[in-house]
Image (cartoon, rainbow, N blue to C red):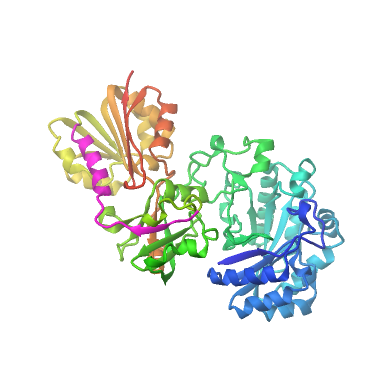
Amino acid sequence: MKALIKVGYGCNDHCSFCHTLDVRHVDAEAAEVHAKIERAKALGHSMVVLSGGEPTIRPELLAWASHVARLGMDFGLVTNGRMLSYPSLVDELARRRLRYVYLSLHGGTAKVHDLMVRSQAFEETYGAIAVLSGRGLDFTVNCVITRHNVEHLRGLVDAVRPYEDVRLKLSMVEPKGGGAALFEHLMPRVSDVAAKVRDAIDYARSLGMDRVSHGAIPLCLMRGYEDAFDDLKTHRFATMIEVGEPDFYPVDDLNKVQPEASCRGCSASGPCPGLYRGYHETFGHAELSPIRDRPRSNSFHWVLEETVEAPRREGCPLLRDGVSPWDRGRHLFVRHGDRVARFFTPTRDFSDAELVEIKHARGQLYVDVAREKAAPDDFARDLCPLERSAVCAGCPERARCTGLFEPRLDDTRFARADARVRAHLARLEGDVLDVGAGHGRYLDVLAARAGAIRYRALDPDPAAVAALAARGLDARVASAEGWAREAAPASLDHVLVSRSWNHLADPHAFAIAVERALRPGGELFVADDAAFGLARTRAQAARAERSLAALEHYRNDVAADAARALAEAAPGLEELERHEVVPGEGTLWTLRLRKTR
């Protein structure tokens, strides 16, 4: 994992959109950078990347690179590349483990690039690409898109194409520093940027070049190009530190927002960058629309990185070492006896905000104790709950710390949740439709109601339906959407949606159909699992990644989300009972509603 260190904000370019427009006079002392390199090593990073401003104009550059190499880490640069047009300097850096370069080029010609950086820089910057290419580097050329170069992206493709080891990234300008001060002069509409970026990617592919990515553009505007998304996390940056900051902080997306009105329920919300906050404040979110038809995962894994001795008598290891470098959602510390294990999740199926919600607000984190399974199928047996350690109670750092967790053995949360569902089913009478019945998890309790209910099951999986039919049940192959189109009015007393709500591609249409199909006084019962995280060894995580299990969820709704969707689509359904997922409870939430008219 990479640590990003800002060494100062001075620069030999004068980019109009520069993030650090107002602090270009500020530089870190050499000793400060030296100490931060050592801190990066102590935090377990494998690479230090220097940025600025422009790090290559600092006279300490080679000394810093040497220090990084002596500590056994690789070295990288975020740079405008001008100094790297000198082969002798690049040779010296290569001997000091230079492995990564992220170079800024904002036009394929001198006219465009020099206009953007307000310097005569193109020959040096573009020349650096030739010097750096062919050295086995992890090498990206990044273009920041403003009104002044948005029409010239194909030229960048042509410029980079000859260098087969170079990736080209096309990024939306951020309204920060110069981007904020010159907002009206620089800021294009994001939908226009997306159209030009799609065109540039298509153009590159038509030339046999599949090395163009995009950044900071909402994924709903890049349909069909989602896999080309690129940001600091895809480059495996974990932490960063600005000049004068006392310690590293996790790389985050706090400068971006996913507006509720346009993004709620979007199945691409995990990897999507959303909109820059300054852009959203000015232009709003009308250009966005949620993606509804993309399956997503309902779980993720924290992968074991390290286990260390941490005697309980010495107190909290996080407080001793500092809480700020550890990501509140992505890191996980688990204490067992006098040892503490550190886990990390690189998942892009979930956003940073979702990870924090799952971990801290809902408490849905578990140790995977099913050693040989690719995925847990019996939660009560396969998952050991994790709960916040007692040492966290009353801690002044609790609200910003990633937390210390401990396993809770002999827990009954899954049995309690299952009992709630069974208690409801045991009261059913009349005509019952089980939507997404699967292989019949609760057939024993339904069979016990045979004299009181007339049961029918729907499922899109022919194998599941065949298994139900073999047990003498009225079952047929049908999707919820197909049933919704033909549902007979006022024909049902109960509709069951047990662990299949988040499988519905169109819950709005389904809710309308349920309201129509229920008799007055009839009930809808919904139960599903909230998203959760699993602490796993590397071997377990690798086994899960190799699994052929298909993604089937379109959302990761909890009871509140389902209740809101049903209220909007089916106002004739009155909510009777809701059980949310909270810390100390299992993954299963339930919702019961009655048709009032």
Whether residue 547 is visible to the viewer of this picture, yes or no, is no
Q: Which residues are magenta?
A: 401-427
438 or 46: nearer the viewer: 46
User: Would residue 164 be found to the left or right of residue 228 on screen?
Assistant: right
The residue at 65%/64% (across/down) is: 5
In the current view of this chain or complex, which residue is farthest to the front?
Answer: 313
User: Would residue 213 be found to the left or right of residue 486 on screen?
Assistant: right
Q: Quadrant of residue 543?
A: bottom left
- Which percent across, then down, holds residue 132? 72, 73
- Which percent across, then down, holds residue 529? 35, 45
- Which percent across, then down, holds residue 460? 33, 43
Instruction: Based on the picture, tell me whether residue 475 belongs to the magenta stretch.
Output: no
The residue at 39%/57% (across/down) is: 391
Whether residue 408 is visible to the viewer of this picture, yes or no, is yes
Q: Quadrant of residue 102?
A: bottom right
581 or 127: nearer the viewer: 581
451 or 42: nearer the viewer: 42
- Which percent across, then down, holds residue 551? 41, 51
Instruction: Based on the picture, tell me whether residue 423 belongs to the magenta stretch.
Output: yes
Quadrant of the rendering where the N terminus is positioned = bottom right
Quadrant of the rendering where the C terminus is positioned = top left
Question: Exactly how many numbered labels are in the figure?
Answer: 0
The residue at 61%/57% (across/down) is: 231
Q: Compared to 71, does 377 lie above or below?
A: above
User: Would residue 144 be found to the left or right of residue 594 on screen?
Assistant: right
The residue at 57%/52% (across/down) is: 226
Q: Compared to 262, does 367 lie above or below?
A: below
189 or 382: nearer the viewer: 382
